[in-house]
Amino acid sequence: MSRRQRKIELKSTLWFMPLWYILGAIGLSVFTFYLDYVIDVSLYLPAAIGFSGQTLQVLLSALVGGVLTLSAFTINSLLVALTTFSGQFSSKMLVNFVSDRATQHVLGIFNGSFIYVLLNFLYVTHGEEEFIVATPVLSILTAITAAITFIYFINHTTTWMQVHNISSNMNEKSKSVQSSLEKELESYHIEKEVDKASLPLEADGQVIKASQSGYLQVADFSRLIKQANRDEVLLKFEVRIGEFVLEGTPLLMYWEYGQPISPERYLKSIEIGVKQTEIQDLEYGLIKLAEVAIKAIGHNDPLTATNTIHQIADLLKSIGQSRNFSPYLFDQEQELRIILNQKNFPYFLHKGFASIREYANQNSTIMTELLTMIALLSKTMDQEVHEDLWEFACQTILGFDNYSLYENDCLYILEQLSEVAKNTGNQKDYLFLLEYMLQRVSSKSAANVSSLSYLENDGKS
């Protein structure tokens, strides 16, 4: 496992952050013991804030029970939140909530508080003549901190479970993955044209196969390029990051220009695991958002579905405007070393919206929202993707075959389709789709389609 992957895996577990709090609690308990039993800080502080040994044991026993009770309520709230996320939204969201820093800090505070108070309880004696200050003061402050943290956790959970925060957090996570990947590959992208005709033939290449089945999670591109430079080879990825492979599936194709190479060196720079991860996989973030929208459609929750569609559109805009989508990676000597297996914008557009369109089952509200987002994307993105956006809009409209629409539903859909046609310069094709949609108006309202006429005139103009 690479250092980067190990770091992300640790952040996705519940025990890593609490472990640091427990270690801190042990250190604080040792410091408290030092204050009370080594330098006897009670000699320098007012007697009113001190406790005898027997009284302090009663206090600490009550604090141990109180902190443990708060911890139990917190764990229960956490389980309820995880169950809700898994059932109502998506099981893939469990990792997002567990890896959230606020969630991990809360669990760490409760575990650390319990360990700290418990350790203090162990070395306090029953002596009446014993006068202790640091232990009761710090233990009470620790219990107060735990109580405040419990209130914060309840507020954090209810806030995190709100629809707009869920989809926004997932969107930001995917954008951070994209930004990290672009930063990683930035130094290997150069302004140099690659003549595809000059590339070696696949028949002349040799294949490196997968040693196990699983998902291609991470590729250490820096290490691969350095190794390819030393061996004087050109590598070509046969699969994408996040794609499932079987044992024996071709992973890399390479062309030797020097001495024979050892394929095992390159396999060490590629991680294959049993699950998909977001470390380098942009597609996985889109799939997670789309799954939330699909679950919302199944639960008759249009607000969640539309909000998620908005976040998908924002993520698609970020992906489409990326300037580092060149599949060619060069070494420091500007020699081509790696050819990536990358998908273009239409592929990500399909992954983000097509499954929602399918499960919406021609729901006019969801379809209207999809076309609205397509219209917004056509306004803000470069002309290079306009035809892709128009093609997706056309396929969405043509999907209403043998399905009738009410007049107002047809009106709202055609308004957004008209916007897409204007922004992409496809007014002529829009007229054809307009006639097609007019035929879909239900028999109950087909007698009155005058309100749609201005859309036809607008398309002609």
Image (cartoon, rainbow, N blue to C red):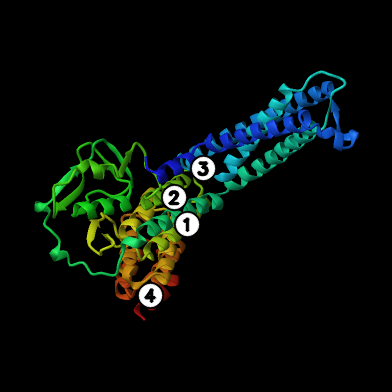
Query: In front here: 414 or 207?
Result: 207
Query: In front here: 449 or 94?
Result: 94
Q: What residue type is labelled 3?
A: Ser
CB under 8 Å between callouts 2 and 1?
yes
Q: Label 1: how many residues lie within 10 Å, few (<14), some (14-19) or many (20+)?
A: many
Residue 422: image tag: 4
Look at 73% across and 31% down and name the residue there: 34
Local SS, label 3: loop
Q: How far apart are marks 1 and 3 (CA)?
A: 20 Å
Q: Which of label 1 and label 3 is nearer to you?
A: 3
CB under 8 Å between callouts 1 and 3?
no
View extreme (left): residue: 203
Q: Which of label 4 and label 1 is nearer to you?
A: 1
Look at 41% across and 56% down and name the residue there: 178
List the residue tagged with mark 1: 311
Q: Which of marks 4 and 1 is nearer the N terminus?
A: 1
Look at 84% across and 23% down and name the residue there: 130
Q: In which quarter of the image is the C terminus?
A: bottom left
List the residue tagged with mark 2: 289
Q: Which of label 2 and label 3 is nearer to you?
A: 3
Residue 99: image tag: 3
397 w.r.t. 142: above or below:
below
- In percent of width and height, residue 110 lies at 65, 34
161 w.r.t. 126: above or below:
below
Q: Earlier in the sequence, mark 2 or mark 1?
A: 2
Residue 186 appears anywhere in the view: yes
